[in-house]
Amino acid sequence: MDYEANVTYITLDGHVEVNKYRYVYFFIMFIVYTLIICSNSTIVYLIWVHQNLHEPMYIFIAALLINSVVYSTNIYPKLLFDFLSEKQIISYSACLFQFYIFYTFASSEFLLLSAMAYDRYVSICKPLQYHTIMRKTTVSIFLLFAWLLPACHIALPTILSSKAKLCDLTLKGIFCNNSIYKLQCVTSRVITIYGVVSLADLSILPMLFIIFTYIKIFIVTYRSCREVRKKAADTCLPHLLVLISFSILCAYDISIARVESNFSKTARLIMTLQTILYHSLFNPLIYGLKMKEISKHLKRLLCPAKII
């Protein structure tokens, strides 16, 4: 009882007419979450079991899809529970944990896409040196860096937020994102400055690196034969589509927190749903259909009778 009395609970006030449409919300989100888990896990399974997919490019794709599973699992189970509950609340400590996981794995996505861009650059622009540069050790370092750097970066604002005094216990959202700063009586200057640094390190710089890398790839392929251009298009286009999709969703997330007072509750809900619905389904769809080797194994798995 003493423990419960000391727990601070946050009300998630971003739901729209949840009492009236709770079962509709629950059914739709349950179907979406099931599709996310099944589609992403299927591609990861194919990459795991097939030896010819044990290449750096496919390993990075598997890491990206694992990110999507963790990213979604951080949000959907709590969301489904809230739809069936009379009160949509969360303890402040659980809210900070959700915030931490959300931004750690969202940030690591940019770093994984950067690693994939570098892999494509070496493969297309330096094919003779590819196996020398992209060794298992190199891939392991990239993966460790992509997950560890965001985890360390996001830890500081999370710890500082846990010690901040709260003047509001109502969050205008359906899960804990950067809107939690609006609950604090005074937003720490350290958090504000560090947030800008983190945005640069984890989003802007990787984005610039990816753009620079693909410009180099396009220059090389433009001067090369048709076969090289086809290889570049087949392997680079899916990564670019995923990058564009994810960048748009990140812009949505930032805009929700910055200009939320200018939107109606329904508009905020729709914008928030954009950040958690599409991308985790978009990734396996793009890689499953556009990556030739993955698509071939996927067809064999889903339609074994039709494959000779």
Image: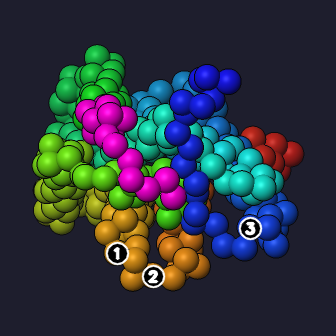
- Residue 287, given in percent of the width and then of the height, sits at 52, 52
Sequence-wise, which precedes: disc 2 or disc 3?
3
The quadrant of the picture occupied by the N terminus is top right
Q: Amino acid at mark 2?
A: Phe
Badge 1: how crowded within 10 Å, few (<14), some, or many (20+)? few
Residue occupied by mark 2: 263
Sequence-wise, which precedes: disc 3 or disc 1?
3
Residue under the point 19% across and 33% down: 128
Dividing the picture into quadrants, the one containing residue 289 is bottom right
Question: Position of 250 compared to 8: left or right?
Answer: left
- Magenta span includes 167: yes
**Count of labels in the image:** 3
- Residue 212, given in percent of the width and then of the height, sits at 13, 56
Q: Amino acid at mark 1?
A: Val
Q: Amino acid at mark 3?
A: Val
Residue occupied by mark 1: 259
- Residue 279, given in percent of the width and then of the height, sits at 51, 58
Residue nearest the observer in this picture, 162 or 158: 162
Q: Are marks 1 and 2 in contact (CB under 8 Å)?
A: yes
Task: Using the rendered image of the protein, determine whether residue 66 is visible from the camera's viewpoint.
Answer: no
Dividing the picture into quadrants, the one containing residue 7 is top right
